[in-house]
Image (cartoon, rainbow, N blue to C red):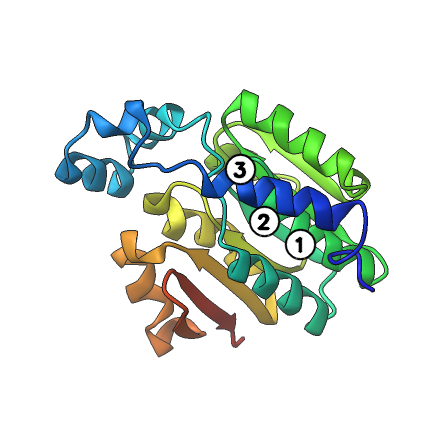
Amino acid sequence: MTTLTSTPLAPLLDRLFEEADSQSVQESPAVAALSSAERSRLMRSKTDYLDFYGRLKDLPLAVSRETGVLLYMLTRSGNVRTIVEFGTSFGISTLHLAAALRDNGGGYLITSEFEPSKVVRARRNLTDGGLIDLVEIREGDALQTLGVDLPETVDLLLLDGAKALYPEILGLMESRLRPGAFIVADNADYSPEYLAYVRSPANGYLSTPFGEDVELSMRLG
């Protein structure tokens, strides 16, 4: 048995995924009032993201179950010790990453979330899952919170916050990514600038779409 598949984490994740599956972004009153064009604009905006994601503060915005397993597997197989996550939300992805750190024998995960109510929920979920000791949650805009006091080397980076900021967050981390480090970007199709960058061999990455909604990249040097 692994931390991921045993108590207390396994039943906690089952509950959190069930709750996430029952809530749709499109059906949220705060989002339903927006046209599809306006939603797309807000998701791609580098200036209006705080307003848009503030509208979604009560939604988990969770990774898929498959992406959660992928995060666990990448962390375990790479013997990852240091992780940075952009976009904590309710902490579902954070739980998968921290579980893998636990099973690797320990490590350190820094995650950033600007919505205070989500920080509270994520901290509770990590505590209930027995993994809070491995995680530092930084509250605030990630352009500030992830710009200071980072580990010298980052083994894995998860991008799952405001999509328009993926290039900027990667830029903050790039000098710290070790060769072979994985970068997982959820819903990266909303950030064409990011995709163009990691898919260009000149920038030092090997990158490929994974599943329907993830871009998986490796730092080559």
Disc 2 and disc 1: Cα gap in Å? 6 Å
Compared to residue 191, the image places residue 32 above or below, namely above
Say which residue label 3 marks. Answer: 19
Residue 127 in the image: state x and y as whole percent: 77, 34
Question: Which residue occupies 16% across, 34% down?
Answer: 38
Mark 3 and mark 2 lie on one chain; the one further toward the N terminus is 3
**Residue type, mark 3 in image:** Glu
Residue 39 in the image: state x and y as whole percent: 22, 36
Left or right for 30, reference 143: left
Circle number at residue 97: 1
The answer to whether one can see residue 150 in this image is: no
Question: Which residue occupies 46% across, 54% down?
Answer: 170
Circle number at residue 110: none
**Residue type, mark 1 in image:** Leu
Callout 3: few (<14), some (14-19), or many (20+) C-alpha neighbours within 10 Å? few
Q: Quadrant of the N terminus?
A: bottom right
